[in-house]
Amino acid sequence: MKYYSTKNKAYHVDLKAAVLKSLPPDNGLYMPEQINRLSDDFFKNLTQLSFQESSFQVAHNLMGDAVPSKDLQGIIDRAINFSAPLHQMTDDIYTQELWHGPSLAFKDFGARFMAELMSYLVKDDNEKLSILVATSGDTGGAVAAGFYGVEGIDVTILYPKGKVSPLQELQLTTWGGNIKALEIDGTFDDCQALVKAAFLDQEINAKRNLSSANSINIARLIPQSFYYFEAMKQLKNQDKPVVFSVPSGNFGNLTAGLLAKRMGLPVARFLAATNLNNIVPHYLATNDYAPRPSLQTISNAMDVGRPSNFQRMVDLYDDNWDRITRDIEGFYYSDEDTRFAVKYLQKAYDYIADPHGAIGFLALQQYLQDHPGHQGIFLETAHPAKFLPVMEPVLGEIPVPAALSDLRAKTSEAEAMSTEFAAFKAWLV
């Protein structure tokens, strides 16, 4: 399997280059040269396959023979060793809980798979790999958990000052060892811009062997497609059309779903659910893509004003707005709407959703009202206890898992930095 740049389909690299270099030199994003439909037998037997078995076939379809089957199966068995269960609320509304991994967020799927794959790809290399990752909250914690102690790889996490929850910040800053945290005096978009600029800087690349663990890296999207298949097989009714409501910030999660659909997963529609950072819903409604500085909201992981994976979304549809809008519909909601949904879910279904999943629920509920005969799954992307400053004023005290409460006893270490690229570059070199 080869991978091309979204800005130049004639530019191809192999899996190792796509994963370890993260970005093409033209600042596009890598995509698989082929996205084949999985076999009829695969879908016929899907409900009988384990999560690991279906994930292996999906990964092999997107990676070809770049990793021998035995090694790929080992990578998946070690990385995808937790569940992604469905929770049913009504006959037609489900949520898929994607927070059963070590950092209690859906990013664990991508981070753990990437850590295993990168470790495999660099095992015979002499040069240390330096991973840069920008985070709006959950990515950094999952990457830190996935890569901590991995030999030959160090990680630098950039996060926006004052814009992640206290427990999220502890997940970024209490590791030490091969994990370092930089507190950037700006937004997530500023963090992301610093990472992208570093990849395009020749002097930095001459001195550091850089890679990224953000969803700009194709190795993040491949495992995120796994749980769409896992969700589909758990549905009680396999005959009703299915929609997925995806809380979205950088749009890696939704793009992974589009890969699953391209591989044959029978998804009737995707709902792009955002907070007031509604760049993609605006585009879907108007055919006008207008990035802007991000707004701070209570669903902080979605506070993205220039979503990277938009490049991949339009590439999948050859930049054809009519085709894109046949598969994806946009919805966006305010903080007031989000608080209402959190309270409603607890009262109506005795279910505690985080502020991101709550937005996914609102979009799904709105869509189903206009489309009877469909069923839907909204993605619950992180454990609600990661957002106590938001959750407790709405619901009162909620249970905090030991994986989070134990962080309070640890020492936090982060280096403060401005948004100036010169300062970041000097730190790197």
Image (spheres, rainbow, N blue to C red):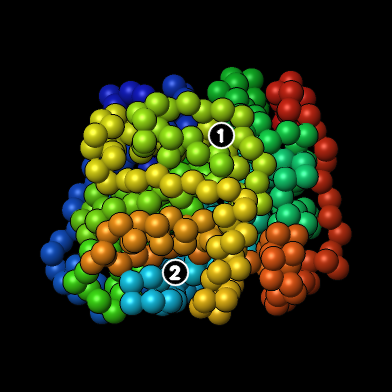
Residue 264 lies left or right of residue 350; in this view the side is left
Front-most of 394 and 211? 394
Residue 95 - label: 2
Residue that numbered label 1 is attached to: 305
Instruction: Find residue 182 and report its horizontal and vertical position in percent.
Output: 76, 41
Say which residue appears at 34% left-offset and 52% top-offset.
270
Could you tell which of marks 2 and 1 lies nearer the N-terminus?
Answer: 2
Q: Position of residue 377 (x, y in %)?
A: 38, 65
Check the image and report above or below for 97 versus 311: below
Question: How many marks can you see?
Answer: 2
Residue nearest the viewer, comparing 174 with 313: 313
Occupied quadrant, residue 163: top right
Left or right: 366 with respect to 159?
A: left
Assign a secondary structure to mark 2: strand
Q: Looking at numbered disc 1 in the image, what kind of residue is underneath it?
A: Gly
Left or right, residue 178 beside residue 107 = right
